Image (cartoon, grey):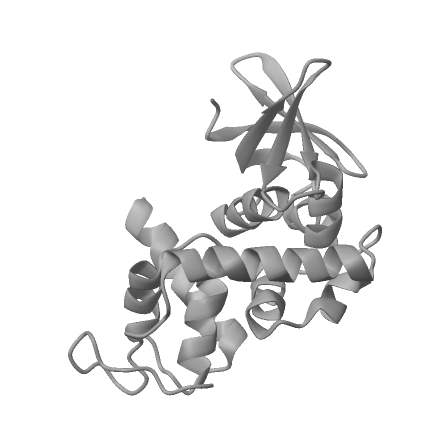
Amino acid sequence: MLYSLTGELVHQEPGIAVVSCGGVGYLCSVSASTQRTLPTSGTVTLYTHMNVTQDAITLYGFATRAELSCFRMLTSVSGIGSKTALSALSAMTPEQLAISVAAGDHKALTCAQGIGNKQAQRIVLELKDKMAGLGAPSDVITAGTPAVGAPAVAGSNAAEAVRALMVLGYSSGEASSLVSRLDPTLPVEKLIAQALRSADAAKQ
């Protein structure tokens, strides 16, 4: 399976980006969010997900690992296909979507084209169930950098950021470790964004 593509961006149209690698042009379906980050030409990197069906092989490309993780979590929800997941990620950033799920705010998801009230409720319920399966965010550090294992303050920005990171596929321990290194007074979305950048840097 392809993990990522790095090559020359040779063609774009709404929802489509073609990346040339070694003389082969890979057509990727992309969200509007990813497309907004792409240059008009030059070298790009897309993190990829390949969907194989009886009728076709479709490659999806994402500007960040967080968006790829969010896409995979969305398509794990019953009744949510790739097209709907791309629509959600075109309307919201991974951080915004994760915060909405963690907060149980299904109405925020209905801003995406093709996602109605019932689908939004299903996304929130199923992803919150998956979060529960990963463990409760009980070890968040909420002030400074004291010893790991300090309890979270209910409703704190740090605790909300951990819950949102779990929506993106991180375990409770991984999310807590990432957030514990940050300033807990930052807004939730900034905490998530900085935690994701830190996780990406560690993987490089």
For residue 85, side relative to residue 128 (left or right): right
Image location (x, y in percent) of residue 63: 57, 45
Q: Nearer the viewer, residue 102 or 118?
A: 118
Q: Position of residue 106 (x, y in %)?
A: 71, 67
Q: Nearer the viewer, residue 23 or 1?
A: 1
180 or 119: nearer the viewer: 119
- The image shows residue 178, relative to residue 88, as above or below, that is below
The image quadrant that residue 18 belongs to is top right
Q: Residue at x 68, y 52 (%)?
A: 89
Residue displayed at 71% across by 39% down? 81
Q: Is residue 121 visible?
A: yes
With respect to residue 38, does 179 lie above or below?
below
Q: Is residue 126 left or right of residue 36?
A: left
Picture quadrant of residue 15:
top right
x, y (%) of residue 8? 59, 27
Tell me the quarter of the image containing the C terminus. Answer: top left
Q: Quadrant of residue 92?
A: bottom right
Image location (x, y in percent) of residue 49:
56, 32
Asked if 197 appears above or below 23 in the picture, the reply is below
- Do we see residue 45 in this rendering? no
Is residue 10 positioned above or below 108 on the image? Answer: above
The tally of labels here is 0
